[in-house]
Image (cartoon, helix red, strand yellow):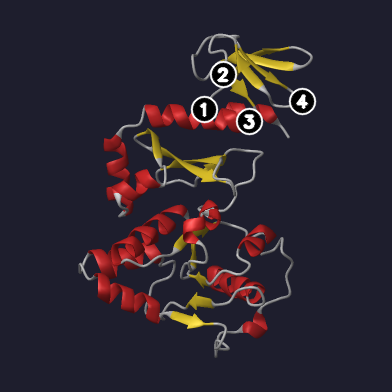
Amino acid sequence: MNFQRIFEFWNTKFTDKNDSQWIGTCPFCHKEKHFYVNKESGLWTCFICSPIGGNIYTFLNKIYENLLNDKDDDLLRSLARLKYVSYLKLKEWGIVPIHKHEYVIPYYNDNGKICNLKRYPIGKKGLFTPELRAGIYGVHQLFDVHKKRWPVFIVEAEFNAITLDWFFQKIGFKAICIAIHGTYNKDLIDYLNGWPVYICLDNDENARQAGIKLTVKLKPICPAINILIWPEEFSKNYDIRDFIKDYVLQPKDFEGGRAKLFSFFVDFKTDTLGDIALKNIPVCSYEEL
């Protein structure tokens, strides 16, 4: 693992090194040549901030803690308006601003500990902390004893999960919302063993095929699987957030939006999906999912 990339991604400036350490400016106290990182282990310390220090995950936690302490709620409200997302839900999910045009999205592991921080610049593709696994957004909820065996809704992208979570809370529907991105690995399959699942990916061909592949993989291990099939009249790339804006927020019709959304789901346990071309799905490995 290239630990140097992780620290530099979060604005650590290294100006010197020796046989075992990189030496640079501390991103917390900003004192030059007082921040040390072990090249082999990634363990770090600052002799001004001392006794703080630790591994790469304590570093990410310290970065996040500082952002939380310095957060500007007005910037978070601006993001809420831009994304048609609840401001309070953004706070609940831990989104914090870096500045007006960039935000941080925390990812948590099975134990509810931060495993990655994603930088989200407005209008651009988000960037995960390099060298670390991205994880699955919201997966820690599966280990909450108070949410045991709630239905799990799988969406694309973090803001879809946050918005759907807000909608379900408003209508009193208990569910877990998680977001996947890019690739679906074996961990996702293992996590969902025994859970009822609703797959609601975006309205495009890649997402459609990926959703069906995922459904096929989950069928033997999940008690219920439903997949969202967007009607033909919906535009390409339409997603859950678009739906809630168009059919819940603008008409202010929560019950109508709920009924319409759930009418789009097909029960994969009892329905063969009819004309959905399962025969065109190639055999794939977990790495491809």
Q: Secondary structure at mark 2?
A: loop
Q: Which mark is residue 52?
A: 2
Of the residues shown, which amino acid type is indicated by label 3? Ile
Res. 261 visible in picture: yes
Which is in the foreground here, disc 2 or disc 3? 2
Residue on which the image places disc 3: 56
Work out whether residue 157 or residue 163 is closer to the camera in this orientation and state it: 163
Q: Nearer the viewer, mark 4 or mark 1?
A: 1
Say above or below: 19 vs 54. Answer: above
Residue drawn at 46 percent across, 53 percent down: 158
Sequence-wise first label, 3 or 1: 3
Relative depth, front residue between 110 and 94: 110
Q: Residue at x 74, y 27 (%)?
A: 41
Query: Disc 4 versus disc 1: distance between alpha carbons?
Result: 21 Å
> Where residue 184 sits in the image (x, y, percent)?
63, 61
Answer yes or no: is residue 9 visible.
no
Q: Is residue 170 above or below residue 1?
A: below
Pointers 1 and 2 in contact (C-beta within 8 Å): yes
Q: Are marks 2 and 4 in contact (CB under 8 Å)?
A: no
- Residue hosting label 4: 40
Please count the marks in the image. Answer: 4
Between the C-alphas of marks 2 and 4, the distance is 19 Å
